[in-house]
Amino acid sequence: MSIQINKSYFISNKHGMKLEFLSFGAVLRSCILPGNERLDVVLGFDETKDYLNSMQMENPPYFGCIVGRFAGRIQNGLVNIGGNEIQLSRNNGPHHLHGGKNSFSRVFWDVEENQESNQLTFSYVCPDGTENYPGELKVQVRYTLTEQNELKITMRAVSTEDTIINLTQHHYWNLGGHASSVDDQKIRINATHFLEKNSENIPTGNFEQWSTTPMHEELNKELRDGLDHTFVISDPSEIQATLTHPSNGWKMFVKSNQPAAHLFIGCGLPENLRGKEGVSYHSTSGVCFEMQNFPDAPNHEHFPSSFLRKDEIYENNTTFHFVNQDNE
């Protein structure tokens, strides 16, 4: 195991796909697709210090990181666990967001390299009582790159006490490269409904229908403008989402064991935020496919449970598969 603040960790395959990671936030810093060394399809920063500084912003971008202990918002930071009402920290107005101020996105992880298997394993032990969550939580995130150009992400966790959990990844994807826009890239989602939310982005408990045919309709302009919605997966046995570039042949398939896909286009990014290679990022620089449970799930009995019993194992398995249709 190692923690080196300025060290990058790399995995690559025989086709020339290359991924770079940092121990801070278990960040995916770059993803180079085969055939073009300049085609880096994730947003990020050049230096680790830029990731640290970004977390001090009023609305951090969470570039490329792992999010937890609980992804999304929890209304007023209040949860009930085992009959005990717990007040979590409030870091998004009156609400709790993405695990609070001492979240997984803000810590340095241990890293174990396995180059023979094209794997990196990140580990972190979150102390009992962090942000007032009960239980010491041991977390492991394994990134595996296959020879089929699949990025497989396995997240596992176990707690010493009954608790709640909702992990996800916060990678901003752009199949045209991080310096371009996703405006003309097509998004399809295996869902007919998304969660209704109030003016503070808290789920009301109701569902809104946008389509009758999962994966057959492209996400419409009305939803894409300011996209920040949690879609309810219709068929977990099938591909859950796709992103397609209109001209370079690249397509990304998303598959997960999670009940929801939270899609977010960077509409909240600060104007002219300087990213990698001095690029000024903007509101359509990238799109996140956050595979997770429902936000505010502990406060809605009809939502999938986010409860994790003591010593039981939580697991989130998500795969991003990249295919160039011009080369098939």
Image (spheres, rainbow, N blue to C red):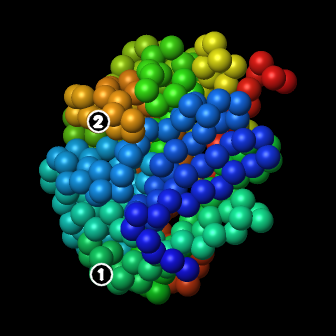
Disc 1 on helix, strand or loop?
Answer: loop
| Residue behind mark 1 | 129
**Position in image of residue 62 (x %, y %):** 35, 49
**Position in image of residue 3 (x %, y %):** 45, 74
**For this rendering, which residue is in front, 274 or 153?**
274
**For this rendering, which residue is in front, 220 or 113?**
113
Disc 2 on helix, strand or loop?
Answer: strand
Amino acid type assigned to the residue bearing label 1 in the image:
Gly
Q: Is residue 267 left or right of residue 164?
A: left
**For this rendering, which residue is in front, 36 or 81?**
36
**Position in image of residue 89 (x %, y %):** 21, 66
**Position in image of residue 208 (x %, y %):** 44, 29
For image coordinates 48% across by 44% down, the residue present is: 171
For image coordinates 55% across by 80% down, the residue present is: 1
Q: Residue furthest right?
A: 328
Dividing the image into 4 quarters, which one contains the C terminus?
top right
| 210 to 264, vertically: above or below | above
Amino acid type assigned to the residue bearing label 2 in the image:
Arg
Residue 194 seen by the camera:
no
Residue 32's label in the rendered image is: none
| 240 to 55, vertically: above or below | above
How far is disc 2 from disc 1 in space, using C-alphas? 35 Å
Count of numbered labels shown in the rendering: 2
Please identify the quarter of the rendering in which residue 248 is found: top right
Q: Is residue 169 left or right of residue 100?
A: right
For image coordinates 38% across by 24% down, the residue present is: 284
Classify mark 1: residues with Cα within 10 Å, few (<14), some (14-19) or many (20+): few
For image coordinates 41% across by 43% down, the residue present is: 44
Tell me if label 2 and label 1 are in contact, CB under 8 Å. Answer: no
Nearer mark to the viewer, of 2 and 1: 2
| Residue behind mark 2 | 274
